[in-house]
Image (cartoon, rainbow, N blue to C red):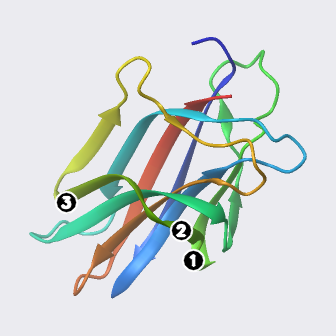
């Protein structure tokens, strides 16, 4: 797949309930599609024997977050067109029944998903539409992080 390649990571303090740690979406100024081919999830907090449910889901509104600057994987490429955010104080608007991945993960583990060629998660070129990575745990409070790698 030809195109410019980027990565971004985001974190969030997971308390009771579901919280988003990373969004990657199209920018109104540069409305290109993003082909996400790698995701990494993990816990940054003190390891414990808890399990969180990680969900990657389509979203149409980014919510309120801290902007994350995507990193170019090839320094000769242009800056990323995607909008990326972390540390959400207002959750994105998720599209019902559009869960792309759901991974139950022990807090002592890290998970890496890599798409088979041609099986990338593709986001629409519509402003603020993309994916959000969120996690859920009923009792544990911990810092968690997600990383996305994509082609524009």
* Residue 1 rendering spot, x and y as whole percentages: 57, 12
Q: Which SS class for mark 1?
A: loop
- Mark 3 to mark 2 CA distance (whole Å): 19 Å
Q: Earlier in the sequence, mark 1 or mark 3?
A: 1
Q: Secondary structure at mark 2?
A: strand
- Residue ID for mark 3: 104
The answer to the question of whether label 1 and label 3 lie on touching residues, with beta carbons closer than 8 A, is no
**Badge 1, how many Cα within 10 Å: few under 14, some, many 20+?**
some
The residue drawn where x is 25% and y is 48% is: 110
The answer, for residue 29, to whether it is visible in the render is yes
| Residue closest to the far top | 2
Query: Which of the two residues, 144 or 82, is positioned nearer the viewer here?
Result: 82
**Which residue matches tag 1?**
91
Figure check: 17 above or below 98: below
Q: Which mark is residue 94?
A: 2
User: Which residue is at a point 57% across and 77% down the rendered structure image?
Assistant: 91
Which residue is at a point 60% across and 71% down the rendered structure image? 92
Please indicate, yes or no, whether residue 15 appears anywhere in the rendered image. no
The answer to whether residue 77 is left or right of residue 103 is right
């Amino acid at each position: 797949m030809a195109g410019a390649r980027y990565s971004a990571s985001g974190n969030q303090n997971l308390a009771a309930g579901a919280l988003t740690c990373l969004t990657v979406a199209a920018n109104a100024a540069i409305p290109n599609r993003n082909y996400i081919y790698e995701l990494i999830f993990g816990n940054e907090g003190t390891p414990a024997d808890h399990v969180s449910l990680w969900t990657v889901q389509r979203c149409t509104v980014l919510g309120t977050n801290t902007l994350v600057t995507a990193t170019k994987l090839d320094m000769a490429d242009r800056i990323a067109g995607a909008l990326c955010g972390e540390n959400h104080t207002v959750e994105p608007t998720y599209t019902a029944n559009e869960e792309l991945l759901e991974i139950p993960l022990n807090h002592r583990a890290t998970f890496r998903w890599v798409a088979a060629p041609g099986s990338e998660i593709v986001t629409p070129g519509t402003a603020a539409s993309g994916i959000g990575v969120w996690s859920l745990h009923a009792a544990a409070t911990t810092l968690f992080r997600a990383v996305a790698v994509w082609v524009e």
